[in-house]
Image (cartoon, rainbow, N blue to C red):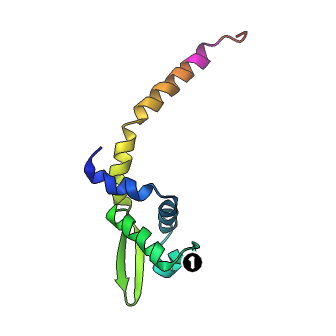
């Protein structure tokens, strides 16, 4: 795996960060809005957001006094590309299962 992918996988390894990404896939959110979804401090949520920024999975921008977070779908592309390599193994197993089912006789 490319060292460049490490920050993205580190960010995706945590269930809270995955939940944050799911929320941000719906809309841009302020730090307060993200924090309201979890039973943790603003500082803890901010740290999670920083890890997501390091993984290039979200963008953060300032708008007045607000800090707004937005999903960066392009940041997920390298992760998806890396994972798609392993599709071939699923495809082979599913093809073998299909063949086994199709060649099975009714009395078996």
Tell me the quarter of the picture where residue 12 sits: bottom left
Region of the chain picked out in magenta, as a range:
100-104
Kindly identify the residue that appears in the image at 57 percent across and 77 percent down: 36
Residue 29 within the magenta-colored segment of the rendering: no
Q: Position of residue 39 (x, y in %)?
A: 59, 73
Q: Quick one: 70 or 32, which is closer to the camera?
A: 32
Left of 49 or right of it: where is 15?
Answer: right
Q: What is the count of numbered marks?
A: 1
Q: Position of residue 7 (x, y in %)?
A: 33, 57
Left of 8 or right of it: where is 19?
Answer: right
Kindly identify the residue that appears in the image at 57 percent across and 73 percent down: 37
Residue 58 seen in the current view = no
Q: Position of residue 33 (x, y in %)?
A: 52, 78
Residue 103 within the magenta-colored segment of the rendering: yes
Q: Position of residue 20 (x, y in %)?
A: 49, 66
Q: Please, which residue is most extreme toward the right here?
A: 107
Secondary structure mostly seen in the magenta stretch: helix
> Which corner quadrant holds the C terminus?
top right
Left of 79 or right of it: where is 28?
Answer: right
> Which corner quadrant holds the N terminus?
top left
Whether 104 is drawn above or below 7: the answer is above
Report crowding for label 1: few under 14, some 14 to 19, many 20 or more residues within 10 A (C-alpha).
Answer: few
Whether 84 is drawn above or below 8: the answer is above
Q: Please, which residue is most extreme toward the bottom here?
A: 64
User: Circle 1 is placed at which residue position?
Assistant: 36
Element class at badge 1: helix
Residue 5 seen in the current view = yes
């Amino acid at each position: 795996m490319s060292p460049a992918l490490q920050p993205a996988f580190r960010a995706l390894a945590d269930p809270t960060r995955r939940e944050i990404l799911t929320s941000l896939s719906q809309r841009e959110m302020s730090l307060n809005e993200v924090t309201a979804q979890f039973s943790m401090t603003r500082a803890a949520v901010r740290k999670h957001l920083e890890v997501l920024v390091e993984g290039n999975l979200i963008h953060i921008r300032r708008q007045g006094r607000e800090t707004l977070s937005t999903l960066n779908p392009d940041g997920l592309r390298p992760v998806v590309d890396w994972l798609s390599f392993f599709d071939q193994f699923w495809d082979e197993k599913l093809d073998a299962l299909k063949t086994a089912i199709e060649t099975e006789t009714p009395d078996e």
